Each structure stands twice: as structure tokens, then as C-alpha cells.
Image (cartoon, rainbow, N blue to C red):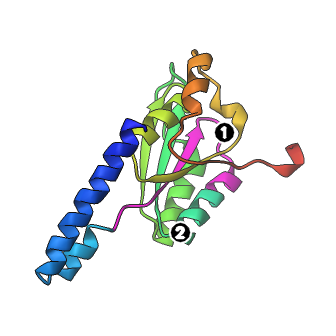
Amino acid sequence: MDANKIKKMLKQVEDSMAAVSFAEEGQFESANNLFRRERRVLLALKEGSLDPKTLKYAMNSAMRIHAKLDILYVSAPEAACEEGGPVLRQFESDLRHAGIEYRLNRRSGCLKQEIIDYTNKEHEVLFVVVESPGSLDRDCKKSGVLTELWKNLRCPLVVVTDQAGA
């Protein structure tokens, strides 16, 4: 069994035992809070390819399942992480207007590697939303190693594509 799965199971048992202790003492709110896990959707974006359909899909998904949204904005390795332009600024405005909590993470390099690193670190991510499979390998130097790591992605990957182009 994977070491991360064992750690996760042990954490769940520990939280359950703590919740039982709080419940026995009549502190039901505290007991209930131990079982409330943060739910997050990761929207992975590559600089220069911000598709409004992908942004809308991620926003609607987060809203429907009452999750917070993490935006991973990755630029080319040699470029400084820029703001993302008017499309990203408008999207942030839409998120605030809809009342969706979000956090914007700027990185540079290989989008695929950044997704793997992010989901390995952030265990609350339920699934990852990306625009197209073509943008995942751009700026990646070690594709063979990444392909093996990609098979072990901690959560589902949702690819939003234009059906006319498919």
C-alpha cells in the first residue's frame, strides 16, 4: 500500500478519535469541525492560452460542489510570471462576484510538472481542470519521467476542449 494512503488513513483515524472525545464531552460543534475538510478544484492554466470555456467550467464546478478554487497560472521558464492579462483579471472579478473563494498561484516552467507538484502538496484537491492536453507538455524537458509520474496523479484530470476542434 502507498505510504501516502497509509498516512491519510492514520490521520482519518486520529481525527475520528478526537471527534469522539469532543462529542463525549458535549462539544458537538468541535467534533463536527474535525470532519469538515476543505474541498478544492485546481484550475491549471498555461500562459497565453486562457480559454473562457475552461474558466467557466472550473468556476461552475467549484460553485456546484461548494469547493474553493485554486488557480495555477504557469508561464514559460524564461518569462517572468505576468498578471495573466484582462481575461484572468475578469475571471477573478467573476469569482469574487459569485462568492467563490480562490487563490492564485503563479509558477513558471512545465505545466504538467507543476500540476503534479501541486497535487502532491495540496491533498484537498478533488480534481484538476485543464484546457487541452497539448498545453500540458509545452516547456517540459523530461517528458519520459513526467509520463510515469502523471500515471500517479492524486486526483482526476478534467480536460475541457472545443468539440469543433476534436
Estimate the spatial distance between the alpha carbons at disc 1 and disc 2, rounded to whole Å: 26 Å
Q: Can the viewer see residue 81 in this picture?
A: no
Q: Is residue 164 left or right of residue 114?
A: right
Question: Type of residue at label 1?
Answer: Ser
Residue 101 percent location from the top left of the image:
42, 63
Secondary structure beneath label 2: loop
Residue pictured at 86% horizontal, 43% vertical: 166
Q: Residue furthest left?
A: 25
Query: Mark 2 — residue?
Result: 65
Residue 19's quadrant in the figure? bottom left
Residue pictured at 70% horizontal, 36% vertical: 133
Residue 106 or residue 19, whichever sits in front: 19
Query: Mark 1 — residue?
Result: 49
Residue 30 percent location from the top left of the image:
19, 74
Q: Can the viewer see residue 147 in this picture?
A: yes
Q: Residue furthest front?
A: 1
Magenta stretch bounds:
36-55
Is 155 magenta? The answer is no
Secondary structure beneath label 1: loop
Height in image: 26 above or below 135?
below
Height in image: 1 above or below 69?
above
The quarter of the picture where the N terminus appears is: top left
Q: Residue furthest bottom?
A: 26
Residue 119's quadrant in the figure? top left
Residue 64 percent location from the top left of the image:
57, 71
Residue 129 or residue 108, whichever sits in front: 129
